[in-house]
């Protein structure tokens, strides 16, 4: 089947990535709300290690989401909607360990200013830093309708603006506080 090993395009990957980022954000926000509620109910004051704990959670939660989803299903929810999946460079299933490594590198992308993601636009197989580190490829695994593809590409084009808005919000602080 020729579509099975056709590299997924940059913008459709980005569309799936935006959906996954929103899913991670919603779940992470719910966890934060539960944490804040428990702190206020039990009058627990944050300690000096709170910043380190937040940083560890910022890395571990998306890593676990990507690691489990890709290790178990070969793709994430966003990738499912985009009709793409992840395979090893030899065409085999990716497995949990490789998926976790790939997820960790992907989770580090904001700290690397997304330079590793940009590499996907310049390589023939459209492989990004996380793909090179984990020995993987993101490929089309099913044909999707033109309308669905257009929506995914539109979301992919919106993704850099969502990242910029998030970075701007972080730079100016959280208006309501957390």
Image (spheres, rainbow, N blue to C red):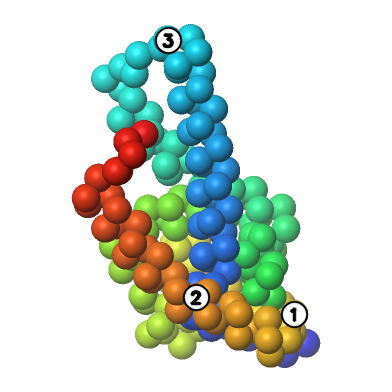
* Disc 1: which residue: 142
Few, some or many C-alpha atoms within 10 Å of disc 1 (few <14, some 14-19, many ≥20)?
Answer: few
Image quarter in which the N terminus is found: bottom right
* Disc 2: which residue: 156
Image quarter in which the C terminus is found: top left
Vertical arrangement, residue 84 with respect to residue 3, above or below: above
* Disc 3: which residue: 43
The residue that appears at 35% across and 14% down in the rendered structure is: 45
Q: Nearer the viewer, mark 2 or mark 3?
A: 3
Q: Is residue 27 left or right of residue 174?
A: right
Question: In terms of depth relative to the viewer, which is nearer, 132 or 58?
Answer: 58
The residue that appears at 62% across and 64% down in the rendered structure is: 78
Among the two numbered marks 3 and 1 on one chain, the one whose residue lies closer to the N terminus: 3
Q: Is residue 87 left or right of residue 143?
A: left
Q: Nearer the viewer, mark 3 or mark 1?
A: 3
Query: Could one spot residue 138 in this view of the protein?
Result: yes
């Amino acid at each position: 089947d020729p579509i099975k090993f056709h590299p997924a395009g940059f913008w459709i990957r980005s569309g799936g990535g935006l959906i996954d980022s929103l899913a991670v954000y919603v779940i992470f926000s719910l966890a934060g709300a539960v944490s804040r509620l428990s702190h206020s109910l039990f009058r627990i004051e944050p300690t000096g290690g709170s910043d380190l704990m937040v940083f560890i959670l910022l890395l571990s939660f998306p890593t676990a989401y990507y690691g489990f989803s890709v290790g178990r299903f070969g793709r994430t929810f966003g990738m499912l909607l985009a009709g793409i999946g992840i395979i090893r460079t030899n065409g085999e299933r990716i497995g949990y360990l490789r998926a976790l490594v790939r997820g960790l590198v992907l989770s580090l992308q904001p700290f690397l200013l997304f330079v590793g993601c940009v590499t996907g636009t310049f390589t023939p197989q459209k492989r990004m830093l996380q793909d090179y580190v984990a020995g993987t490829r993101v490929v089309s695994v099913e044909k999707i309708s033109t309308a669905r593809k257009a929506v995914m590409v539109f979301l992919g084009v919106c993704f850099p603006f969502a990242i910029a808005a998030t970075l701007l919000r972080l730079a100016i602080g959280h208006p309501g506080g957390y």
